[in-house]
Amino acid sequence: MRGAGLAVHFDPIGNIIGRLEGTDPNAPAVITGSHLDTVPEGGGYDGAVGVVAGLAAIKFLQSSGTLTHPLELIIFAAEESSRFGFMTIGSKAMTGMASRYAWSKAKDPAGVTLEKVLRDRGYNLREVDGASRVKDKIKAFVELHIEQGSFLENAEKKIGVVETIAAPTMLKITVEGVAKHAGSTPMDDRHDALVSAAMIVLAVQSIALEQSHCGTVATVGQLKVSPGAMNVIPGLVELWVDLRGVEQESIIETLQDIKDAVSTIADGQETPIAIDVMLSEKPVQMHEMVVQKIEDICISDKIPYQRMNSGAGHDAMNMARLTPTGMIFIPCRGGISHNFEEFTKLADIQTGIEVLTKTLYDLAK
Ligand SMILES: [Zn+2]
């Protein structure tokens, strides 16, 4: 970024901000950006391609004349939740949504606290509020990202113009059974927590299937069985449900149906079950002004595009609370992401960069 002539600084949560001034020193900034962190065994495109594309776009715009508005490229800190269990930490801090108390309890799987990681890098968790930005100083935010699904590839489209980002709801369900000897306990005298948990997994699947016409999805991706021995009836199971959708009503209905199913299973199996709603966010609309600009560029350049929703969360969903926001999706092979196999053709990245460049130009000229 420095090489491209941007003034670079780190904000109090570790977001990296590169800025190119425009002709009007008081004009609000047009911002692009994404993240460089990834998940264990993740690929090289999720996030990174948006950062590289943003830099390419700004370099091009800089070489072709001065714009009225300043341009910024932001590399958001800790977008993925895989290390500390909190997603989009950098953009949350930037948009005034820092959860300082919850973050102060966060630890990675090795037991290292987020607080320590920040401290070792010269930051202080108590000062993260200083990362929040003022609305008036920002005109718009545009993020380019791989789709992380196979919709564009299957539809043979090159650009996805995002309208809504699905909201995640995360549940922790704890099933209490009675741990007993697997050999000496008759089948009719058992309170097997894993059997109840298995019923919950199936219930979550069938409830989400019923709501799938609304774009709602639900997944049980993690189970912790205690004591976890082959010859002991499971006495305690914790499972985590990831529920997402773009229609708030469908999300609420799905959540209610899951709660009802869980209480039926708890009664039927005589295994008490507790549900903890760990996270519940609302779907986020992209701003029609930005959406329309991206769409107009695709139309005038004859690029096959599709308006669509994002099932995955992005920094853009936080930025949308601060400023008119849009997202440009590019295809990713086989819809595979969060995997070494993640891949996007250079030609598709190039198309994305062109659309991003023109969108930024249009907003900043
Ligand atoms: Zn990402």
Image (cartoon, helix red, strand yellow):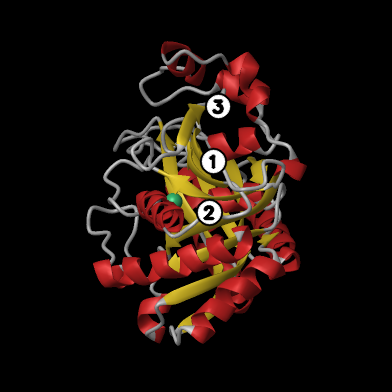
Residue drawn 48% across the image and 57% down it: 65
* Label 3 CB less than 8 angstroms from ligand 1: no
One can see residue 1 in this view: yes
Residue occupying the point 63% across, 53% down: 68
Residue 312 horizontal side relative to residue 275, left or right? left
Q: Residue at x 28, y 50 (%)?
A: 44
3 or 2: tag closer to the N-terminus: 3
Q: Determine if the C-beta at disc 1 is less than 8 A from ligand 1.
A: no
Instruction: Give amino acid for label 2.
Output: Thr
Above or below 142: residue 51: above
Estimate the x, y position of residue 158 in percent, counting from the top left. 40, 78
Q: Position of residue 224 (x, y in %)?
A: 43, 38
Q: What residue is pinned by disc 2?
A: 66
User: Nearer the N terminus, badge 2 or badge 1?
Assistant: 2
277 lies above or below 142: above
* Upstream in sequence: badge 3 or badge 1: 3
Question: Is 136 on the left-hand or right-hand side of 74?
Answer: right
Which residue has dot 3 on it?
11
Task: List x then y, in percent, for residue 280.
Answer: 68, 48
Of the residues shown, which amino acid type is indicated by label 1? Thr
Marks 3 and 2, how far apart in space? Answer: 26 Å
Q: Residue tagged by mark 1?
A: 88
Residue 17: image location, x then y, percent: 50, 36
Q: Name the one closer to the observer, 281 or 9.
A: 9
Label 2 and label 1: CA atoms lie apart by: 32 Å
Name the element at disc 2: loop
